[in-house]
Amino acid sequence: MTLKAEKSHAKGPARLRLGMVGGGVTAFIGAVHRIASRIDDRFVLVAGALDNDPQRGRDFALSIGIEADRAYDSYQEMIKAEALRPDKVDAIAIVTPNFLHFPVAKAALEAGFHVICEKPMTTTLEDARALAEIVKRTGKKLFLTHTYTGYPMVRQAREMVADGAIGALRRVQVEYAQDWLAAPEEDPEAAGANWRNDPKKAGQGGAIGDIGTHAYNLAAFVAAEEPSHLLAELTALVPGRQVDDDAMVLMRYASGAKGTLWASQVAAGNGNNLSLRIYGATGGLEWWQEKPEELWYTPLGEPRRLLLRNGAGATEAAVSGSRIPAAHPEGYLEAFANLYKDAADVLAGNQQQTLVPDAADGVSGLVFVTACLESASNNGTWVSLDALRNG
Amino acid sequence: MTLKAEKSHAKGPARLRLGMVGGGVTAFIGAVHRIASRIDDRFVLVAGALDNDPQRGRDFALSIGIEADRAYDSYQEMIKAEALRPDKVDAIAIVTPNFLHFPVAKAALEAGFHVICEKPMTTTLEDARALAEIVKRTGKKLFLTHTYTGYPMVRQAREMVADGAIGALRRVQVEYAQDWLAAPEEDPEAAGANWRNDPKKAGQGGAIGDIGTHAYNLAAFVAAEEPSHLLAELTALVPGRQVDDDAMVLMRYASGAKGTLWASQVAAGNGNNLSLRIYGATGGLEWWQEKPEELWYTPLGEPRRLLLRNGAGATEAAVSGSRIPAAHPEGYLEAFANLYKDAADVLAGNQQQTLVPDAADGVSGLVFVTACLESASNNGTWVSLDALRNG
Amino acid sequence: MTLKAEKSHAKGPARLRLGMVGGGVTAFIGAVHRIASRIDDRFVLVAGALDNDPQRGRDFALSIGIEADRAYDSYQEMIKAEALRPDKVDAIAIVTPNFLHFPVAKAALEAGFHVICEKPMTTTLEDARALAEIVKRTGKKLFLTHTYTGYPMVRQAREMVADGAIGALRRVQVEYAQDWLAAPEEDPEAAGANWRNDPKKAGQGGAIGDIGTHAYNLAAFVAAEEPSHLLAELTALVPGRQVDDDAMVLMRYASGAKGTLWASQVAAGNGNNLSLRIYGATGGLEWWQEKPEELWYTPLGEPRRLLLRNGAGATEAAVSGSRIPAAHPEGYLEAFANLYKDAADVLAGNQQQTLVPDAADGVSGLVFVTACLESASNNGTWVSLDALRNG
Amino acid sequence: MTLKAEKSHAKGPARLRLGMVGGGVTAFIGAVHRIASRIDDRFVLVAGALDNDPQRGRDFALSIGIEADRAYDSYQEMIKAEALRPDKVDAIAIVTPNFLHFPVAKAALEAGFHVICEKPMTTTLEDARALAEIVKRTGKKLFLTHTYTGYPMVRQAREMVADGAIGALRRVQVEYAQDWLAAPEEDPEAAGANWRNDPKKAGQGGAIGDIGTHAYNLAAFVAAEEPSHLLAELTALVPGRQVDDDAMVLMRYASGAKGTLWASQVAAGNGNNLSLRIYGATGGLEWWQEKPEELWYTPLGEPRRLLLRNGAGATEAAVSGSRIPAAHPEGYLEAFANLYKDAADVLAGNQQQTLVPDAADGVSGLVFVTACLESASNNGTWVSLDALRNG
């Protein structure tokens, strides 16, 4: 095991205090946030309004070590009470269904708290713009947990593209295929995902909002370039579904490059198959989330190279996002932990710049979804993202 | 080594006589046809008009064992002379640049010869329809060498889909990515491919015609279903190129299924990366040409299975298209040889049905290209393939 | 994302108090233990004697949040002081160079502390036996951190073998190949690993002790069967090295099965390439540490199946060792965290049985190393492990 | 498709005349030889004694296009008759069970014919030495069809090792795992392999002779170095089997390098899983027969590179052993065809040197098997190969 990796990630004992909204006993993503916040020992979870059932929320809060006086019945109560404490939380993590992201984030920011928010940032573009304004006005930070930007090899891809490893951008192929909604609607498994299929709670997009936004963000993060126009084909492939479960989007970049984004939750055999393939005039990069330690790099005309996290050829961002040596697999939770670690560094004043997506990325996500819905409702016309951005 | 595979492919000594048009000393695909025709010992190449430079063509013909009196200066001469011989060729292989497929095939069929023709069948839909008519009228056979339909695992995929292994079709993802045209036009390597970039010789489509037709055919072969509408985005990503080198096509099927086809010749790091992923209501199948012995099958909710050519679970078509046991890799040349072997079986009267694509598939290919060009020239509108089919 | 995985791993707020010996600022494995102990929130690190340089050890302890009065100068001091505290630590993690495992563990156990110890448990078989006796006598627990037994798919393999998935054992192929010691001795990188190459600090075995013991443990864990005899070929392939850097071991099982174990630290291109392939009369299982989420299973005569962590076909141990759904990669740190989580469950009285290796496994490891050294010193004779076990 | 690969493999019309002994209607490897001899159009099969049942042999010969007067009842008859013909065969392919290789090859060589012989060359070392003498004395060529040396990426590996790509040899790991004999003996599938399990027909070794010799030859071919000593563990893992079906061999090289060879025919899930991993002081190379187009190369301390047949970085031997561009898979039959093509070039006087194994390699193979049997019969002692070579 190589000494190159023998470095501590600890930056001293100053742990930040974290509050959480949502993430109750039945919620998957809340547990992920809690683990991620602990891995590098930079946050301590001290307060929570974890459930829309207050009693269940308090019970669960106590069971995970939150003190009774900080196990709140509602986010409103939590924000009000914490604001008055001398040891108030430094940041609030929002892990609720989508429709609550906006009101909770707004309330938290306006009460002086930093926010770590699940994606999509809001359910409407209007709300997203409003929230970005609030961030600006309050001077507080909003971190948007687009998990996949936390993977070291994704960060390395971004750095390599920026350093010219593939030359001028030509084509982006980004896919996010799952199959957990492939069974018919009446299937209890699929039913368990119900808020995602309810436009009132999830927003109007289905797959396009739930995972399409991740795919869009990943491509934009690595390419450091967003398309100017898109055209979308949104489909509910499972009969009876109210929202799309499969989305195909064509993208045009101002530079002349082209892109395609596919998001599907009904492709049998695909677990969490997010991938990015990005090609330029002089090379290509390919990454698959299910094998996150690997980044394939081909300089045009040379053999394919398999770059490994923290291995030979690792860039600065990839090394700094690694805890252990190459070939000792890190994964999804460590990628997520990188977002928390970086947020802590920003909040502790250790660094100004961060790779963690912010409110502007949140707006971009809603611009993307809005454009897709508009294009699809017009049987697939090209929609200007620039117009929506300047909206 | 298992005795299951110990079967002879020889069907007796009656070898068929083959003539060839095109395929001279500088042509790649001509050599492929010759090897493929020999592998199962069902054809003997006895005549050829191999080159548009008659002297070079005759010299090369002699060098590969064709007798002097059957090394012809032109296809016209060959067809005329062979028609008069008692030992005339049984079939003529056409391996010229695209624009010659139609006149050579027409002349050969009308002179009473069967035809084995490279794709795309013609350069215009009008010609394709005319050729299909000629096939019908003459009663002669036309075999269209869509290589990839010769792979045993592709044939197995087709059989599995037909047998309901994936349930009702939902989504087709077919890709054909290469990088051999990624270098700038002035590069001698790319220049060497010049007829493909000349609309007069190759037809109006670039990548869409050269490899998009293969991808389209592969998807149609396996799904046994063709889309009713498509929408295309065709791009010349390399500056100065006259035809598209990258094509993205959205497809709608009458059944409600959706499809996407990507063809690119400029994606760095892709050699001959044709793949098909096809998903239905109860399962999925995935195949990559560069690993042609493998077919991934996932029944929804079960573990992924890796099916191997001639291995456990092999279907009839896969076994009959195999020469050697599983795990002894067969490849591109054997896939191609399956087309020749099957053609021989048809011509020898051993079988009526064949999996080898025919003139109808050739028409489908031109319908596809025509629709793509029409859609692209209208900035991406949906075009009815049915309307063109009934043209 | 499926609700199947939406379960909390928290078991209530009772966190255990952890002390640590070794794991100072330059040590890789100490950081791993600290992260692993945090992931599931079952331990809090409150005390440490982290370095053989007391000042450096105290400074580092403070920097990672240990209170000043529990940042000790030596393990002796820590054990003595903690034993007197009402809030004394529940367990002590030992992450020192190998030669200190025995004295520290002995002192800790005899002072009434549970122990979580790095492998190999001791540097001599005599010490291992003595320590096992002390464990027995004190009634305290000793957990041996053979990391790889914490991987869910390794645990699933063990369960599948026990359930008869491969039938009677025939052959075991276990390999652990690295390349981080491949450079010549004078290379600073290799020099950084110096204690491992010093028989006084690491024990007499080199690769055989450092990683061979992991490989041996992995095979024994999955097969639930240990060989009766072995024959070893130990080599220092890098000139000038004092201990073996490459080891090949043949193994015979009482049942008639055969095994091979290869451990090398000088095989260029191998990062942390531990793998296990295990074959029985009716099936085979294959696992690679660098792709830890995947387990290949082949019932004899059927297609290969790719089993995924927490996916279709997951066994109980694999599900309970998972935090997130299939296809969201967990890795090395989560495998390590499973050891800590399970240790916590035992120490909290939540469960009696555990999959975490214990002192008996530690003795087995030293029996293995001792037998290898004996065989190698006799130019490769068969050595009876049973005789050494009964020693 | 790149013009780099657009070259003809035809070397003019002078096809050589081939006779065949063995390879009747039920024999797998005879069909492979026939296909391989046709692929590059350098041989025509004109004579055969194909079966130990004369009538069945003649019938089959006619069915595959051999003229009646050259469909012989026995190899003796064939050799005698062909020797008298003006158009006699140039070479005789021997594809019989092992015990006939020696008498047929002897008779053929002494009658003035070149020989293309299946491995192992003979069933005893004594016969092997005698045959090598006969080759020398007669001045005729003997080509030994160790198939795997015909793969372009194996040839590239050999060239890279010779060019210093991995530095001084340190370790060789060669494996050949199958599962087609894993079922119990009474199973009809396994019974179909009966001559292989009969020491009178196959020689005394089972797996060690049938596939171990392939593995040994592959390692020696790439390393260009053979071990000086070996130690073997031979096992019949299937109860009741007369010969080994699993063999593990340790090897020592005079240079200090070490090697391991595993051959098994009972490892469930392995089809034809031959692999070679070879490591030196400055790099490593890895190749798997089931993915024969790929060669992994890691210069120590650099990223892994995936070298493809006829792709970027291809060496001379790899290019000249390729028919089609990279990423258009060639396979087992083309590897085999390379042996025939190279044999033709030697016999036609086009080249002096050849990569095709010869009688010396045949002797090496028997030295290897003899040493393994001797070591195993002494419970695993080190046996000097040098002593046997100088025998």
Image (cartoon, coloured by chain):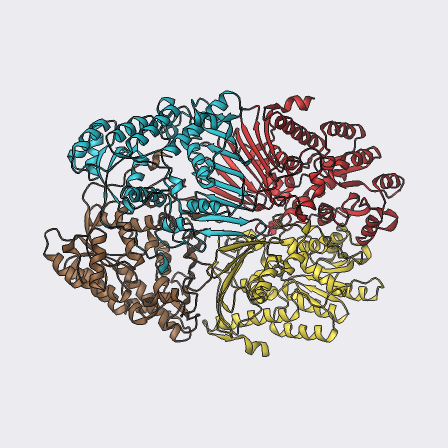
Chain colours: A cyan, B red, C brown, D yellow
In this view, A290 is above or below D308: above
Picture quarter containing residue A147?
top left
Quadrant for the N terminus of chain C, please. Answer: top left
Residue B373: in sight, yes or no?
yes
In the image, C364 versus D189, the foreground residue is: C364
Picture quarter containing residue D289?
bottom right
Residue D175: in sight, yes or no?
no
Residue depicted at x 25% and y 69% = C126
In the image, C277 versus C165, the foreground residue is: C277
In the image, B353 versus C5, the foreground residue is: C5
**Percent position (x, y) of residue C200?**
29, 71
Picture quarter containing residue B243?
top right
In the image, B350 versus A52, the foreground residue is: A52
**Percent position (x, y) of residue A321?**
36, 48
**Percent position (x, y) of residue B374?**
64, 26
Residue depicted at x 33% and y 69% = C370
Quadrant for the C terminus of chain C, please. Answer: bottom left
- Please count the marks in the image: 0
In this view, C201 is above or below A170: below
**Percent position (x, y) of residue D275?**
53, 58
